[in-house]
Image (tube, grey):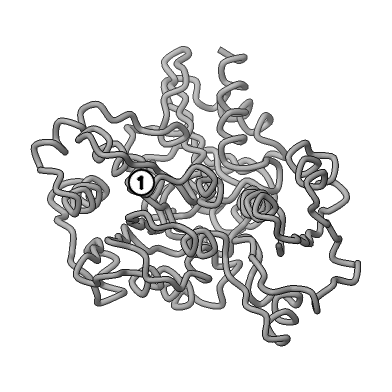
Amino acid sequence: MIGLGISGRAAADWLLSQNFCVFAVDKKASDLRALPPVSSLLEKGLVLFSEEEPLPLASISFAILSPGISLRHPLVQTVLSLGIEVIGEVEFALRHLRNRCVGITGTNGKTTTTLLTAHLLQSSGLAARAVGNVGVPLSSYLSEAKEDEILVLELSSFQLETMQTRSLMGAVILNITPDHLDRYDSMQSYIDAKMRIASCLIDEDHFFVSAQAYSLTKRGHILDSSSSENVQAAFRLASLFDVSSSQCMQALSTFKKPPHRIEWVAEKNGSVYYNDSKATNVEAVIHAVNSLPGPLVLLIGGLDKGAPYTPWIDSFRGKVKMLVAFGQAAFTMESELASAFPFCRAATLAEALQIASTHAAGGASVLLSPGCSSYDQFRNYEHRGDEFKRLVREMV
């Protein structure tokens, strides 16, 4: 196991249950040992190494790579040079499953579309489950797999990099806009990673893409853009299992959007507070701003992902009253945006919220839509969103 995050732990747990000898390496090995899930794996026989320790590479049959680690990592390159196969956790799990599967990727909207697709299938009486990047490692399903259950896979570009098996009955690319440019050499490399989903299809006739994605990929059936492309994508995937449009429409009315997506939190003195912590890239923030009435005081920042913030200048004019930036990206954001908008920089989210609430007086709304990943100060975007909601509720 190269990396022992949530997905790596799930794969290791199943392998240990099947009496495999499992080695894991992680740069945070000393900290991980204290975590109950890792302690449990160690008790079951997992051998955990730090990156500085020598590894028993001669004893390894294959390696499972954490999606957060690049194929260009020196250890990965060493493993590959020895002729050892390196696969991802999703690819590993798919090799041990016989379920019907569909896959969903895109820069934004993946989780909502994945959950909606599973909801449509379940509402029509089919057994279905949302797994993958949605927060449920596919390997965690191996011990309870039911072959009649349809698996709806949310797939990130990182996961797609190591997928090979033609296991998908249908696939969707919702959109492709600049993201993860701290990982990829170019936008084209990012597009290529997303496009790997097509090579995992059993039948390429069941490949659906948004009009925006088609302009980049030149492959797939274009989704109808007259209504939400996310909804259209879910409907098209559900139709592969003979779910009718009328069944889909009925199920759509009972679907609840997941949290941290333009989520109403509270209102105080005419100012509404919204949590959009899931907005981890530039395009997602533009969508959030366009979805709400102005004026807005916008909380942005976190861990920079390499994309420029200048597209916000034209998109925010007349709508955004002030920008308040926090975290590692705050200085970069200030250099790119401070000449176009009133701008404040804060060290933490709590400080940023205090500044925003002061400047929102008079009827502006406060929107947390960071445009960055959360790992500089939080465990994940959920942690960041939950902390924002806690701070807002304490304040009001």
Q: Quadrant of residue 379?
A: top right
Does residue 2 lie above or below 361 as drawn?
A: below
| Amino acid type of the residue tagged 1 in the rendering | Thr
Element carrying mark 1: helix
- 177 left or right, relative to 71: left
Q: Say which residue label 1 marks.
A: 114
Residue situated in front as seen by the camera: 226 or 396: 226
- 338 left or right, relative to 9: left
- 116 left or right, relative to 297: left
Q: Quadrant of residue 98?
A: bottom left
- Quadrant containing the N terminus in the rendered view: bottom right
Does residue 278 lie above or below 103 as drawn?
A: above
Q: Residue at x 68, y 39 (%)?
A: 346
Does residue 110 lie above or below 56 as drawn?
A: above
Residue 113 x %, y % = 33, 46
- Quadrant containing the C terminus in the rendered view: top right
